[in-house]
Amino acid sequence: MSNGKTGRKALSWVWLVLGLAYFFIPLISTFLFSLKGKKGVLSFVAYQHVFADPNFLKTFTFSLQMSIYTILVGLILIVPTAIWINLKLPKVKPLIELFSLMPFVIPPVVLAFGLIKSYARPPLALVSSPALLVAGYVVISFPYIYRSIDTGLTSIDLKVLTEAAQSLGAGWGSILFRVILPNLRTALLSAIFLTFATVIGELTLAVLLAWPAFGPYMAHVGRDLAYEPAALAILSFMMTWGSISIIQILSRGIPGSRSNVGGLH
Amino acid sequence: MGFIELHGVSKSFGKNTVVRNLFLSVEKGEFVSFLGGSGCGKTTTLRMIAGFEIPSSGKILVDGKDVSNVPPAKRNLGMVFQNYALFPNMTVRKNIGFGLKIAGVSAHEIEKRVDEMLALIHMEEFANRYPHQLSGGQQQRVALARAIAVRPKALLLDEPLSALDAKIRVRLRDDIRAIQQKLGITTIYVTHDQEEAMSISDRIAVMRNGKIEQIGTPFEIYNRPATSYVASFIGTLNLLEATVVDANNGIVSIGSMKLKTASSLDRMQDKPVKLTVRPEALSFANPADPVTADTNVLSGTIETIKFLGSTVRYVMKFGDTFMYMDRFNNPQLELPKKGDPVSVIFSKEACRILPADEESANSLKGTEEEL
Ligand SMILES: Nc1ncnc2c1ncn2[C@@H]1O[C@H](COP(=O)(O)OP(=O)(O)OP(=O)(O)O)[C@@H](O)[C@H]1O
Ligand SMILES: [Mg+2]
């Protein structure tokens, strides 16, 4: 009997090692490859090249800016909507959930052409404005924002908390800022980082609307160079994990909150 | 005029009417319970008073003012929920002080009032804990303190104890009553637990199908139930199908047995009725006792005996009819066995006659009052 037990234990170790290998081998080989920029020795020269290229910083800053606008617009639009739907219109929830899948079903190319067609001529000649890009990004990140917030809202007893606050005299402002949002901290953080990751890497919209964004830059580098793309891949991987660690750290010690990271997958 | 008044209040959800033309008047400082089975409209009625539901028709008055169109945040009524509803992001102190902060009370004053509340619920040492670090009973105490910290006009509680285990439930209900008496706060309390309602309330409103079937003190409700629903909802009861055989002398028959009652049964000759008698009204007949015109004596056999602790419940069979009798326990008691013959006695005043069907409830009411 004890033999069977150790056997099963060994088997789970084997699976764990296989899983980790599946995950880490490509990562490690990419990393090693990124260090081979100089013949014969391992060096960070590819990383130096990445940081030395003025376009790296320029496109990254641009995309960072766009992601901040997208996050602001997205949260301002979607958070009150999600709260209202959960409180007052739970019947339309399935419909909104269906809507939130649209960006996955409709390719970004279609979205981009739609935007160009609709906003190319007066009175709505917005094609040259970054507002149109942000609008497109909001559409693309809608599923991530909505689902993070919705997960957060269902993990607290929204209706009863709202009623408790109302019975204590609170208006909508106090309810939102003192009761609901503080309890959504984790959900908000995960919405923010998912949107950030989406916008930073986005390619199609940026190319078709002709903006010097980080996505097109990465694609360009990947096409023309060998070691630098590997370095970029490692950098963006570190950024993603950095973001997730920040969510974990910031949400630690929030009473009653569970981390919502990964709630989407 | 009552402090809280409901005038012909109804509520429908779509086609489903859940509260029907309800009238109620609660005095200032009074503790009234809504008692009734699941789905009878207790919560809906309470939520209309709190302002979370809008009545389909009728008026609600609090302190003489029509509040029907006042939003809940402006009604100044404290509310305690079944699942505590504490704010998870705030400590006990912040939770209790929340309403005061909203009201713009100074930080110093809030501190003072929260300390008073913590003392009232005996939880001074928990001030800086978060809700998830408290037991259910402690959380509900904090919720109670939070609701009364703003000195609301009235306190509304919706089954506040039903998520707690039995021991805590009894202790906390006594605490709620004590605090209510100390502050003299008008209170409406929803429960489906009859024992809880009886032990805590000044008056009980027994609800059924969106209506108040009877309202009265626990003593009245228990001893003078107006309908067989109320009678059977509260306590244990012998509820027997009977037929009026002699309306003038208040005599009914159950099978081959004839029983005397103190009810006047005008215009009920030969009609079916229900006879009710509480198990504690029965006792063993002593052969030496003279049978008077005012007592009923029945002979039958023991069916089973249930030992309930402080009392012993005898289940007996008289012809085709089963009846309960409750007697106090005592260690010298010799319990009879199944099949043993018994003879029980009860007064005719202990028998209440109730209408056989609910429609006739009103026609009999007049005669009930004369008793
Ligand atoms: N928002 C609503 N929409 C539709 N129907 C509702 C709504 N709220 C309550 N009801 C219905 O109204 C009826 C009364 O509900 P209510 O919650 O008042 O009952 P209750 O007496 O509190 O019961 P319980 O003891 O189970 O809490 C139920 O049949 C319920 O299904
Ligand atoms: Mg209820």
Image (spheres, helix red, strand yellow):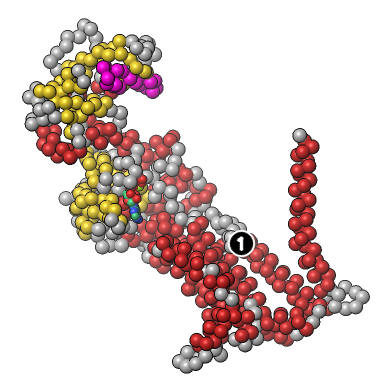
Q: Percent x, y for residue A183?
A: 51, 60
| Relative height, residue A156 to residue A9 (above, below) | below
Between A174 and B358, which is closer to the camera in this rendering?
Answer: B358
In the displayed orientation, state which residue is furthest to the bottom. Answer: A122
Looking at the image, residue B258 lies above or below residue B2 = above
Circle 1 sits on which residue?
A265
Asked if ligand 1 lies within 8 A of label 1, the reply is no
Does the rendering let one see residue B203?
Answer: yes
Instruction: Examine the structure image and report whether residue B316 is included in the region drawn in magenta.
Output: yes
Q: Is residue B115 above or below residue A193?
A: above
- Describe the element under mark 1 as helix, strand or loop: loop
Give above or below for B345 relative to B240: above
Give the side of residue B315 with respect to residue A140, left or right: left
User: What residue sits 23% from the left and 50% below the top?
Assistant: B20
- Which quarter of the figure has residue A9? top right
Q: Quadrant of residue B13?
A: bottom left
Q: Residue at x 53, y 83 (%)?
A: A114
Q: Disc 1 residue type?
A: His
Query: Which quadrant, please, contains the C terminus of chain B?
Result: top left
Q: Position of residue B189 (x, y in %)?
A: 32, 45
- Residue A25 in the figure: left or right of residue B10: right
Residue at 90 percent of width and 74 percent of height: A41
Badge 1 local density, few (<14 within 10 Å), some, or many (20+)?
few
Residue B79 horizontal side relative to residue B270, left or right: right
Q: Main secondary structure of the magenta part?
A: strand
Residue A11's spot in the image, x, y percent? 77, 47
Task: Please state the extent of the stretch shown in magenta in the rendering.
Answer: B306-324
**Most extreme residue toward the top, as rendered?**
B288
